[in-house]
């Protein structure tokens, strides 16, 4: 299979403009004759559904939550990047592009990232016009903060609830189109498979989570905006419902899955408190602007933080990376936290934590300023831990947060299946091996507001008057497969709950394919995961029936897919013997313990093809070429 | 600690519901309320009983999915907190806890603690937005917003749409929810062109749903997990009245 990324010709800063001119258009009257399915209503899906409907397409939007406003984008805290250079500190589109490619450890496509940086400008304009209440200066202009991996202030924010406010902007735009009957909304409805006809995506099979009915939906194109797959680890910062089923089912139908092992560990999460833990809570990375990270120098130091004098503290990020200090990228911050904990210097129960201390910042700018910046985060921390971070340093530890990998897409955001698109976190495109803070919101909205609405027209224009409906035999076939799978889950009648399997899978994956990966562990995981998966299908218990609300059944389907995905992640991690970004292979590090890339051998996107349950997946490679960015060993010293 | 739970079980929208008693032994004070229910559910399933159904997702107090009456109080005893962020350290050994779904005619029960809150979405669809198509926005700094207005708008916009305000209100009114959106958009310069039509339509939709009227009990404000003030209801009422009076004057002027 030849992968064609369809990157336009020309200089990097003219590619998107040129491409937009070359894309075929659908005239306004004809747009009405096209149906588009959008699955997921987060920043990418919500913005895409609203924008496509504004253009005149008929949109069917799906979400498993009870309302499109609850998609997990809502939980993003810190902010959204844009190269506005409002702060006059030397930012530019090129600098944002450069920072993003570098931050991604040179494993992303230059052309995609440059487009993202260009569109960052439009996103802020659009969101401000929608009434997103961004933070403001006294003169009424927009305020910015700085974020990890950058030396300029380009992050726009709405206290620590930026994702919520941006999502509500997209949700309201979507609500407007629902009221105008341009979008038909299907809440509490979960996509369980995609339907292909003659190699093109022509619809989905979804389960109505209230009635339990398996339903068919036909369309001219299908857009997957279903987010990432961090929940494969059971404990992650994702919402409990976040899952990989839509993209995994698409993968099983032929869509390539790119860079599955590129996962991001977020450095600032609240440490695990016990066995009952159901998810991990992130504290925005913006906290690192003012908080200082440290552990005691002495592993045996058991004094409370306040009693440890300055000279007996190790501010390890400031010590090792004097120019970036506490603002090093996420992967670097996470690995260093793990390292000091592995040395026995971790703090809190179980020794899996480091301090994030605001005492100096409170002394410098005052408690009120800190409260204005992070008030809601401090409150959340106190609710969860029962400790007051204004007086006692926070304890943080890295946790699974974001997945850079996802469905392979070309420059048009189309997968290798005609008419099947993947946008936002569900695709692999823009973040390489590591995503910079405040870039996920940017990418989701760039894809949904400003890329897909153009590129999808190019595809549709080539398929005028070529409609199918749900009577087509392909729908019969896929529907009966979906039904059979649901029936099979209900019929196992075993003794272990879905969650108990999920926890075990997560632990296994965290140990073998988490913050550090090595050959031995990965090979072992590749033996253990299929064993555990077989046990799942033999011994899981899903009570009740499929005719109505059944949350255990919903979970069981998702976990069954996580098992298969986990295996592919390990396979991908095993194959990539270099370290890059969030993927740290123990065998590939510098003498100082930093991730060591191998550009000669691994400067490619690894895109996996499913070949059936009994066959090994096949890897395809899209070589990455860098014409505008100089490949260097990342250094934040 | 050991707790006793009384949980509303209802197998479907038309089925009859009842309170069922469950033991919850060995609860860890660091658990969240929902984690405590997870543990109960694990045990129920092991014993062959279907787990208690409840909506939940982010578990960090921002998605608005979760919500239940805990000892008669929406989201439980701790102010400014969703059920998922309520931790068991606020309860004591031996406590009995009554857990029920949101109680409101506008939120029919779907199963156990899960209700249908789509009426709230319909209020937003009636006008809770600024009509600006993708691509037609001016540069973000061209429209200045006074910092205090941006902050007041933000505080209203912080609403998570959980429905606690409705559930707690003796009248089942959705005024706090509606007022929060009316105020968020009405306080910003970008929201001015549609300010009147917005309040008119949103209030009309609110009244068309099965919500009750506001008689200033303030219980909504007390249970709101985002602590949204009823000042915003006053603001909505003023906007609504102004719009109606203006409409009458215009009609007279013919």
Image (spheres, coloured by chain):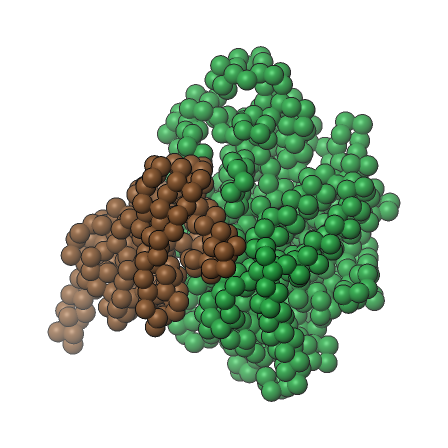
User: Could you tell me residue A411's position as x and y percent?
Assistant: 70, 62
Picture layout, residue A65 above or below residue A141? below
Position of A468 compared to A133: left or right?
Answer: right
Which chain does green denote in the image? A
Q: Quadrant of the C terminus of chain A?
A: top right
Position of A63 compared to A575: left or right?
Answer: left
Picture layout, residue A616 above or below residue A264? below
Query: Which residue is most to the front?
Result: B47
User: Could you tell me residue B175's position as x and y percent?
Assistant: 25, 58
Most foreground residue, A398 or A210: A210
Number of numbered callouts drawn: 0
Residue A215 appearing in the image: yes
- The residue drawn where x is 42% and y is 42% is B25
Query: Which residue is most to the right?
Result: A600
- The residue drawn where x is 21% and y is 64% is B212
Q: Quadrant of the N terminus of chain A?
A: bottom right
- The residue drawn where x is 55% and y is 62% is A542
Residue A11 appearing in the image: no
- The residue drawn where x is 71% and y is 67% is A252
User: Could you tell me residue A203's position as x and y percent?
Assistant: 61, 76
Position of A388 compared to A350: left or right?
Answer: left
Per the rendering, the colour in which chain B appears is brown
User: Could you tell me residue A259's position as x and y percent?
Assistant: 73, 53
Most foreground residue, A318 or A238: A238
């Amino acid at each position: 299979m030849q992968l064609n990324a369809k990157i336009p010709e020309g200089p990097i800063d003219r590619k998107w403009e040129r491409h937009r001119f070359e894309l075929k258009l659908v005239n306004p009257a004809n747009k009405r004759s096209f149906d588009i399915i959008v699955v997921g209503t987060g920043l990418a899906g919500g913005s895409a559904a609203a924008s496509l409907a504004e253009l005149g397409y008929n949109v069917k939007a799906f979400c498993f939550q009870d309302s499109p406003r609850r998609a997990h984008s809502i939980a993003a805290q810190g902010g959204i990047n844009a190269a506005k250079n409002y702060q006059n500190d030397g930012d530019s589109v090129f600098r944002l592009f450069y920072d993003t490619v570098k931050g991604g450890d040179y494993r992303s496509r230059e052309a995609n990232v440059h487009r993202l940086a260009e569109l960052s400008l439009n996103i802020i304009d659009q969101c401000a016009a929608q009434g997103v209440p961004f933070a403001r200066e006294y003169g009424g202009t927009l305020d910015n903060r700085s974020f990890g991996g950058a030396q300029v202030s380009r992050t726009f924010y709405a206290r620590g609830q930026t994702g919520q406010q941006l999502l509500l902007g997209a949700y309201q735009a979507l609500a407007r189109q629902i009221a105008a009957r341009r979008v038909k909304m299907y809440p509490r409805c979960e996509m369980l498979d995609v339907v292909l006809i003659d190699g093109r995506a022509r619809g989905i099979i979804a389960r109505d989570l209230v009635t339990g009915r398996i339903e068919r939906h036909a369309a001219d194109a299908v857009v997957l905006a279903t987010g990432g797959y961090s929940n494969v680890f059971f404990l992650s910062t994702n919402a409990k419902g976040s899952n990989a089923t839509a993209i995994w089912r698409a993968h099983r139908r032929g869509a390539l899955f790119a860079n599955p092992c590129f996962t991001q560990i977020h450095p600032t999460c609240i440490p695990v408190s016990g066995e009952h833990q159901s998810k991990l809570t992130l504290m925005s990375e913006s906290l690192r602007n003012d908080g200082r990270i440290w552990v005691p120098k002495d592993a045996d130091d058991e004094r409370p933080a306040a009693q440890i004098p300055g000279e007996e503290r190790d501010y390890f990020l400031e010590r090792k990376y004097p120019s970036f200090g506490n603002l090093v990228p996420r992967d670097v911050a996470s690995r260093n936290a793990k390292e000091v904990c592995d040395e026995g210097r971790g703090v809190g129960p179980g020794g899996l934590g480091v301090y994030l201390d605001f005492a100096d910042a409170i002394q410098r700018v005052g408690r009120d300023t800190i409260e204005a910046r992070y008030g809601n985060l401090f409150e959340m921390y106190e609710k969860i831990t029962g400790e007051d971070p204004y007086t006692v340093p926070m304890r943080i530890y890295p946790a699974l947060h974001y997945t850079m990998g996802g469905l392979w897409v070309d420059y048009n955001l189309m997968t290798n299946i005609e008419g099947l698109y993947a946008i936002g976190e569900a695709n692999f495109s823009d973040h390489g091996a590591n995503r910079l803070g405040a870039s996920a919101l940017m990418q989701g909205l760039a894809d949904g507001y400003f890329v897909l609405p153009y590129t999808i027209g190019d595809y549709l224009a080539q398929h005028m008057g070529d409609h199918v409906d749900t009577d087509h035999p392909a729908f019969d076939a896929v529907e009966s497969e979906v039904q059979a799978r649901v029936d099979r889950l209900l019929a196992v009648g075993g003794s272990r709950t879905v969650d108990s399997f999920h926890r075990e899978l997560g632990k296994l994956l965290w140990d073998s394919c988490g913050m550090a990966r090595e050959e031995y562990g990965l090979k072992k995981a590749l033996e253990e995961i299929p064993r555990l998966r077989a046990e799942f299908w033999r011994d899981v218990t899903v009570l009740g029936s499929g005719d109505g609300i059944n949350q255990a059944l919903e979970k069981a389907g998702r976990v069954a897919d996580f098992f298969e995905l986990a295996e592919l992640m390990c396979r991908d991690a095993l194959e990539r013997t270099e370290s890059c970004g969030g993927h740290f292979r123990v065998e590939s590090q510098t003498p100082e313990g930093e991730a060591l890339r191998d550009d000669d051998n691994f400067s490619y996107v690894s895109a996996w093809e499913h070949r059936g349950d009994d066959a090994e997946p096949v890897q395809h490679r899209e070589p990455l070429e860098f014409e505008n960015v100089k490949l260097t060993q990342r250094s934040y010293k | 600690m050991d707790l006793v739970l009384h949980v509303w079980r209802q197998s479907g929208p038309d089925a009859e519901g009842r309170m069922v008693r469950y033991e919850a032994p060995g609860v860890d004070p660091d658990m969240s309320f929902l984690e405590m229910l997870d543990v109960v559910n694990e045990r129920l399933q092991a014993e062959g009983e279907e787990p208690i159904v409840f909506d939940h997702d982010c578990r960090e107090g921002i998605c608005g999915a979760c919500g239940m009456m805990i000892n008669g109080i929406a989201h439980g005893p701790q102010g400014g907190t969703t059920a998922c962020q309520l931790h068991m350290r606020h309860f004591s050994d031996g406590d009995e806890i009554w857990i029920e779904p949101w109680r409101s005619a506008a939120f029919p029960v779907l199963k156990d603690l899960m209700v249908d809150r789509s009426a709230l979405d319909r209020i937003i669809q009636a006008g809770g937005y600024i009509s600006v198509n993708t691509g037609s926005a001016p540069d973000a700094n061209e429209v200045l917003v006074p910092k205090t207005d941006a902050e007041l708008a933000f505080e209203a916009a912080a609403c998570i749409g959980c429905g606690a305000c409705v559930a707690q209100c003796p009248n089942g009114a959705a005024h706090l929810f509606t007022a929060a959106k009316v105020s968020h958009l009405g306080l910003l310069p970008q929201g001015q062109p549609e300010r009147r039509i917005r309040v008119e339509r949103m209030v009309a939709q609110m009244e068309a749903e099965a919500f009750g009227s506001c008689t200033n009990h303030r219980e909504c404000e007390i249970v709101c997990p985002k602590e949204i003030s009823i000042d915003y209801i006053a603001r909505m009422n003023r906007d609504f009245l102004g719009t109606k009076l203006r409409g009458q004057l215009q009609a007279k002027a013919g």
